[in-house]
Amino acid sequence: MLSIKPIITHAICAAALLTAHSAQASNLFVNAGFEDGTDPWVLVESEVQPWDDKAKTGTNTLFIKTFLSNTSAFQSVDVTAGSGYQFDANFLFEDSTADIIGLSGKLIINWLNDDTLLSSDEAAIDFPAAANVYSLSSLLAAAPDTANKADVGFVFTHPGEQLPGGALSVFGDDFSFTAVEIPEPASIALLSLAGLLTLSRKR
């Protein structure tokens, strides 16, 4: 008897490959690598610094002061209603960041119609297994039908008081926000059926 689970898994992977071209899509962020300072980013308890051993590429990196209670960075981007978008952000966690009790981070896309907030999409920022190495966090979402703008960025919070600095910071670099095609459920179903037929022939 054929197992359906691996077929569906392969179908979802195949559907994801259909959007692989997004990696070559135009980055809608301006100054995505912070090489031109802070503009047009809106920063809270974060700053851009030249930091050769912390930058992923180039010279500058975003110094995120997670030892403070709340830190964030956002940029406003024009979007097309109903279209899919992917937000990718690279973060480097210093050695002692894990010592911040209750620290959490999330990627956020706030969808707007002009200045009116319509809805938000969020994804947790994964804490890497190793310190001082960049890891990628991503958020894939579709713009609401009436959206024409998005505020895109991240927030780090912790419930405690401010802590002394040291190796308690996170660094960010090379962010991207790109338009992507999100496969319809019907497309995944068709790929599942194709996988089922292929396996049947092999048997």
Image (tube, rainbow, N blue to C red):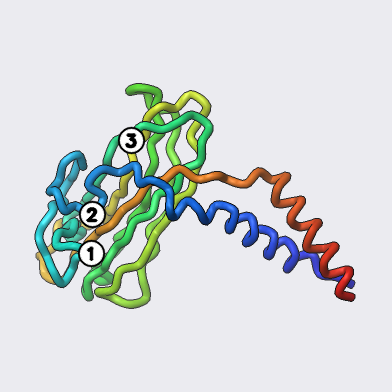
Rendering coords of residue 109 (x, y %):
39, 41
Rendering coords of residue 48 (x, y %):
13, 53
N-terminal of the pair, mark 3 or mark 2, is 2
Write down the residue under mark 1: 57
Q: CA distance from mark 1 to mark 2?
A: 8 Å
66 sits to left or right of 25: left
User: Which is more toward the observer, 52 or 43?
Assistant: 52
The quadrant in which the N terminus is found is bottom right
Question: Circle 2 — which element?
Answer: loop
Rendering coords of residue 100 (x, y %):
24, 66
N-terminal of the pair, mark 3 or mark 1, is 1
Write down the residue under mark 3: 77
N-terminal of the pair, mark 1 or mark 2, is 2
Q: Are marks 1 and 2 in contact (CB under 8 Å)?
A: yes
Q: Amino acid at mark 3?
A: Val
- State the image quarter where residue 57 is shown: bottom left
Q: Amino acid at mark 1?
A: Thr
Q: CA distance from mark 3 to mark 1?
A: 23 Å
Closest to the camera, between mark 3 and mark 1, is 1
User: Which is more toward the observer, 48 or 121?
Assistant: 48
Q: Are marks 3 and 1 in contact (CB under 8 Å)?
A: no
Write down the residue under mark 2: 33
